[in-house]
């Protein structure tokens, strides 16, 4: 699928990113107008804070979100990528600090649902997409993120796609000094190869290396 979104395209082409911060996400939350308003807001909150794949987020059940002391734990089950069968994410738990008002809002929403309820059911698609593999053969897969993509673009005035928030969060973690192994676990990948773009653009690492140059 050809990537046209400017923010996502910039990351892919230059391995640089203009960060989206809490002030930005709060503005986008204010833009949301939907019959399932709380569900829509919490969907954007999870996208922003976790760096998880959009398809993983749509797989979340209410029971996957648990308050543990000062943290809110979000359990991602891992899944085969929608587009590339060989690319898999690893099950993992991401903890968010509970003192953040938006995190509390997410917990309030999840705790009010039955445990086996999909958190973001109204944004889950059943769109069948046909892909052409490298060997020239066609394959069909179910794209659950088509509806989500439409709404996120709408709420952000066309600025961001859902996948942008994955790169935004992982880039922030790298910039804040996360070690390679930590970043790999948070990303849910099996090797360090796919974290290379985030390590490369980390200004924290660039500054540390510059300080050692003589």
Image (tube, rainbow, N blue to C red):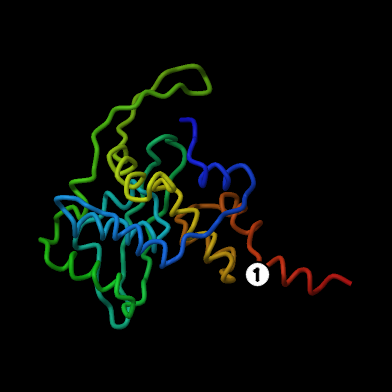
Q: Mark 1 points at which residue?
A: 204
Residue at 46 percent across and 41 percent down: it is 87
The quadrant holding residue 26 is bottom left
Which residue occupies the foreground of this view, 197 or 11?
A: 11
Q: Please indicate whether residue 108 sits to the left or right of residue 30 in the image.
A: left
Residue at coordinates 54% horizontally, 59% vertically from top-left?
Answer: 171
Return the residue nearer the eye: 184 or 98. Answer: 98
Q: In this view, does 145 lie above or below 92?
A: above
Residue nearest the observer in this picture, 59 or 175: 175
Say how many tags the image has. Answer: 1
Instruction: State the SS at label 1.
Output: helix
78 versus 103 height, above or below: above
Residue 120 is situated, as x and y percent measured from the top left of the image, at: 22, 52
Q: Residue placed at 56% from the left, 64% from the top?
A: 181
Q: Position of residue 203 (x, y in %)?
A: 66, 65
In the picture, measured across the screen, residue 202 lies left or right of residue 85, that is right
Viewer-nearest residue: 130 or 15: 15
Q: Residue 200: x percent and y percent? A: 66, 56
Q: Is 165 left or right of 67, judged from the image as shown?
A: right
In the image, what residue occupies the spot 39% across and 48% down?
Answer: 162
Query: Would you call the spot at circle 1 few (<14 residues within 10 Å), some (14-19), or many (20 or more)?
Result: some
């Amino acid at each position: 699928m050809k990537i046209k979104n400017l923010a996502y395209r910039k990351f892919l082409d230059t391995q640089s990113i203009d960060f989206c911060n809490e002030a930005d996400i709060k503005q986008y939350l204010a833009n949301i107008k939907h019959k399932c308003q709380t569900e829509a807001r919490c969907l954007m909150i999870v996208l922003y804070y976790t760096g998880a794949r959009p398809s993983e987020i749509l797989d979340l059940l209410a029971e996957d979100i648990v308050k543990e002391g000062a943290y809110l734990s979000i359990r991602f089950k891992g899944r085969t990528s929608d587009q590339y069968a060989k690319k898999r994410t690893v099950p993992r738990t991401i903890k968010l600090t509970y003192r953040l008002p938006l995190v509390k809002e997410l917990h309030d929403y999840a705790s009010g649902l039955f445990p086996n309820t999909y958190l973001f059911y109204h944004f889950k698609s059943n769109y069948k997409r046909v892909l052409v593999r490298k060997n020239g053969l066609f394959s069909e897969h179910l794209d659950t993120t088509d509806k989500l993509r439409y709404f996120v673009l709408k709420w952000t005035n066309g600025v961001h796609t859902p996948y942008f928030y994955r790169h935004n969060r992982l880039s922030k973690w790298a910039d804040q000094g996360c070690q390679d192994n930590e970043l790999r676990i948070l990303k849910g990948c099996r090797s360090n190869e796919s974290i290379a773009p985030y390590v490369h653009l980390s200004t924290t690492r660039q500054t540390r290396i510059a300080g050692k140059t003589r």
